[in-house]
Image (cartoon, helix red, strand yellow):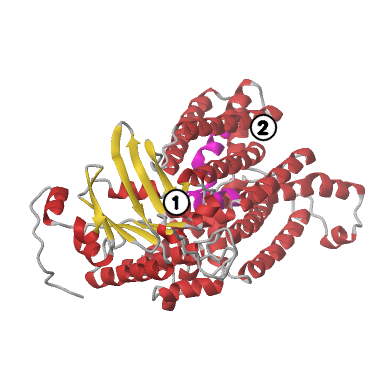
Amino acid sequence: MSALATPLLKVDAIGVRVGGTMLLQNISFALRSGRILALLGANGAGKSTLVATLAGELPLAGGCIELDGRPLTAWPAAELAGRRALNASEPAVPFALSVADYVALGQPFDAPDVEAVAAALTECHAAEWRGRDYATLSLGEQMRVQLARSLYQLGRPLSSTEPQSRCLWLLDEPCAHLDMAQRHFVLTLIARIAREREWAVVFSSHDPMEAQLFADHALLLRKGEVLAFAEANEALTEANLSACYGRSVALRPAFVAL
Amino acid sequence: MTPGGNTLPRAALVVAVLLAAAMLLSLVVGAYPLAISKVLSGQLNEAEWSVLTQLRAPRVIAACAGGAAFALAGAALQALFRNPLADPGLLGVPAAAGLGAAIALIVVGAGAALWIGALIGAGVAIAGMLLVVHRGAAPMAGGTVTLLLLGIAINAACAAGLALLTALASEGQLKTLSFWMLGSFASLDWPVVIAMAVCTALGGVALGVQANALAALALGERAARTVGVNVQQLRVRVALITAAMVAVITAFCGGVGFVGLAAPHIARLAAGSSPRVVLPLAALIGALLCVLADVIARSIAPPIELPVGAITAVLGVPLLVSLVTRRVERA
C-alpha cells in the first residue's frame, strides 16, 4: 500500500464536552489525501465545533484524532502549522496591513518569502491587491487573500522545493456571506488546490449543493452525532437531508448553474 | 505601509538623532543652565560637574527608560488586545501602584516607602491577574476579554481606594501624592535610574522575542493559533512582561500618561504596523517624548517643576484627537 492509500486524517470515536454539555459524540470518519469532505448539519448540529476540534482548539472528552498516523496532541506546534491550516471567520484586522504582509503572516516566525507570497496570491487570483490595505477589500476579496495565506502557510518548503503534500486544510463555512459567483469561485479554487497538491480538505457548509458539486464525501451531523458519512452522492439523499434539517427536503435539478 | 527592510532603519535613525539632540538639550537646560560647549568639551567647574552628573544625567536616563518602557508596553498591549486604544494603564498596574504608594505614604511616610508601596501594589495586581488567567483556562472563550475586564476592575477598585485615602491624607501628603501620580523624572539616584534602565532593556528584549507571535495576532486569535502561535502562553507572557516593566517605572516616576498610547501610533504612522518595527521605533519615540516633556516641565516656570504626566498629556491629547479624526474620516 502506498502512503497515499492510508488515511491522512483519522477521527476515531471522538467526543467533545463544553461545560456539562456533549457537543459532539462518537464521531468517526477517515479522509485520504486529495479528498474533500463536506460537513453539513442544521445550526447547532456541531459543524463549527467539529472544525474547531480538528483545528485542536477544543480538548477531546474521548476518542482520538490522528493526522498522518500521529495523534494530533503528539505533534509539535511548529510542525503542525506546516501541515494543517484553518480558515474560519476572522475578526477585522486592527491596524493597517498590506495584503502581502497579511499573507506573509501565514509563516510568522520566518522571514517573508516574497516570491512564495506572490505565488500564493496569484494562485488565488488576488495578486493585483498585493499593495492594498487588507481592510479595504470586500469580503469576497478578503476570503481569497485568506486562502492565499493558508497556501503560503502550508506551502513552506521543508526538505525539498516541492510544496508539502499530505496537508490538512480546514475551512469553516468558507462561503458564508459570499455571493453565488464568489462561492463558486472559492470552492472551485479550493477543490483545484486539493487535487493538485493532494491535500485533504474539510469544509463546513449550509448548502447541500456545495457538497454535491465540490466534495467527494459528505458527513451529515445531527445534534452532535453522525447521521450519515459516505460518498457525497450516497450521503445526500432526500431521506438523509430531511432527517438532517428536521423537515422534508426534496431534491430537484438546480435551476441555476454556473 | 509595508514594513519593508528600509523603513525601520530610516525612521529609527531620524528619531535616534532627535533623541540624542533632546538628551543634550536636557543636560544643559534648567534652573542652573550649563553651556553646551562646556559640556561637550568637558570644561566644567566642580558645581557644574555635580549638576551634570548628579541632577541632569540621571533624569535624562530616567526619562529615556521611562518613556521607552511605557511605549513598549503600549505597543505590545495594543497588539495583544488587537485594539489601538490599549495603553499601559489597561491592566490596572499603574493604578495599583498608585494605591500602594498612597497607602505607604500615609502609613509610613515619603521616600523609599512610597516606592516600595508602589511596587507591592503593582505586584498584588499582577498576582491577581495571574491567578485569574490560570484558573479560567477556557481555550475558546475570550481570555483577552477576561484580562481586560480584570484591568477595569482593578482600575475601579484602586480609584475608589485612592479617593478614600485622600480624605485621610494631610495637605503635605496630598501634594506629594498628586505630584507623584502625574509623574516626574526628578530626584532619582543613580542606582534607581540604573534599575529602571535595566528593567526597560530586559523588558524590551523579552517583548522583542514575542514580536513575531504578536504580529500574527493581527489575523485574530484562531488564525494565529493555526499558524503556530501559542496564544494562551503569549497572552500570559506579554501581560507579565509589560506589567513588570510598568510596575518598576511607575513606582519610581509615577503615572506618566499618554506616552504608552501615543508613541506606538506615531511609530505605526511612520513605518507600518508590524510589531517587529513598531516595538523598537515606539521605544525610541517614547524616550524622545519623555525627554522633551521633562525639559518643558522644568523650563516653563523655573525653579518650579511642572508634573511630566501633565505635559505628556498636553502633547498627547491633540495627537490622539487627530488620530481618531483620521480613523473617522477613513471609515
Q: Position of residue A75 (x, y in %)?
A: 51, 48
Q: Looking at the image, which residue is at 14% across and 73% down?
A: A256
Q: Position of residue B21 (x, y in %)?
A: 73, 62
Badge 2 element: helix
Q: Looking at the image, which residue is at 59% across and 70% down?
A: B4
Amino acid type, callout 1: Leu
Q: Looking at the image, which residue is at 28% across and 63% down?
A: A215
Q: Nearer the viewer, mark 1 or mark 2?
A: 1
Q: Quadrant of residue A233?
A: bottom left
Badge 1 element: strand
Q: Quadrant of the C terminus of chain B?
A: bottom left
Q: Which residue is mark 1?
A: A67
The answer to whether residue B111 is above or below residue A97 is above
Relative placement, left or right, of A161 versus A72 is right
Q: Main secondary structure of the magenta part?
A: helix
Q: Which residue is mark 2?
A: B115
The answer to whether residue A74 is above or below residue B276 is above
| Marks 1,2: beta carbons within 8 A | no
Relative placement, left or right, of A168 versus A242 is right
Q: Are dots 1 and 2 on a single chain?
A: no
Q: Chain of mark 1?
A: A
Over which residues does the magenta segment extend?
Answer: B72-97
Q: Chain of mark 2?
A: B
Visible residue check, residue B37: yes
Q: Looking at the image, which residue is at 44% across and 73% down?
A: A121
Q: Position of residue B297 (x, y in %)?
A: 65, 50
Which sits in the foreground, B68 or B82?
B82
